[in-house]
Amino acid sequence: MPAGQIVFLGDVHGPRDKWELFRQVVARISLENEEELETIVCQCGDFGYFPNVFDFWPPQNVEIPDWMRVFFIRGNHDNSWALQEFQDCGKPVEFVSRIFFVPDGLVLEFFGQKILFIGGAETPKSCRAQLGIDYWPGEVVNMRSIFRALNNCQDAGPIDFVLSHTCPSSFEIINDKGVEVSDNGCRRLLQEVFEVVSPDFWFFGHYHANSEGKTGTTIWQDLGQTGEVRVFIF
Ligand SMILES: [Fe+2]
């Protein structure tokens, strides 16, 4: 009998569809998990954390089963001003029952697998209509997060998985439909982490591209925003 499963999930953008995509993903995982294995869902940001801005938090009409916990990092379409308050907690913060925010740079271990979580990305200029609604000046990957990630990885030893919102510069994303792909400061900072950490797998979203590849020994994938998941059973 396996100990449990880790599920990696792409962008959700909960408020855009009143959490319908997320509801469907949770339902699908539930359907395929007849044995009710302990399940850790790692969501790559743009979850849809908009407290006090829209009437969309907490996630509506979504019931997280007892055997599931959801861990999300910050994307560029989450209120990073509000999340800033939790960045120094040093542990995941349970916002709603079984839904946790993971501060930047934490390493968590589930079923013997070490996962580095590091959020942040830059909203493309064309999408910056309203400050505090569409984008936040603090949304980018920052040096503080990078230092914390590198320190934590040094303490943790080899990292199996990394979850971020955008991705390192060296990942050549092929995108024919989503967010403009450009090299920028966020990607260069993640590249510094990549060159030190070199995990087995690196998952991200942001570009909505469903693109995948291998750089060095690391298999990477942009999980897109279609509810696609990658499941690992241990
Ligand atoms: Fe997104």
Image: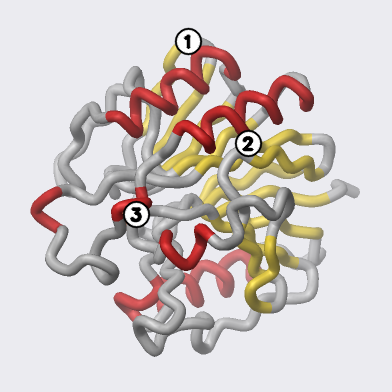
Q: 134 and 174: which one is in front?
A: 134
Q: 143 and 201: which one is in front?
A: 143
Mark pair 1, 3: CA separation? 27 Å
Q: Residue at x 64, y 70 (%)?
A: 31
Q: Is mark 2 within 8 Å of ligand 1?
A: no
Q: Earlier in the sequence, mark 2 or mark 1?
A: 2
The residue pinned by badge 1 equals 216
Of the two numbered discs 1 and 3 in the rendering, the one whose residue sits closer to the viewer: 3
User: Three-letter amino acid code at disc 1?
Assistant: Gly
Mark pair 2, 1: CA separation? 18 Å
Q: 28 and 73: which one is in front?
A: 73
Q: Position of residue 216 (x, y in %)?
A: 47, 10
Q: Is residue 187 above or below residue 100?
A: above
Q: Quadrant of residue 190?
A: top left
Q: Earlier in the sequence, mark 2 or mark 3?
A: 3
The quadrant the C terminus occupies is top right
The residue pinned by badge 3 equals 76
**Secondary structure category for the residue under label 2:** strand
Q: Residue at x 42, y 69 (%)?
A: 48
User: Three-letter amino acid code at disc 2?
Assistant: Leu
Q: Position of residue 233 (x, y in %)?
A: 73, 44
**Secondary structure category for the residue under label 1:** loop
User: Three-letter amino acid code at disc 3?
Assistant: Asn
The residue pinned by badge 2 equals 116
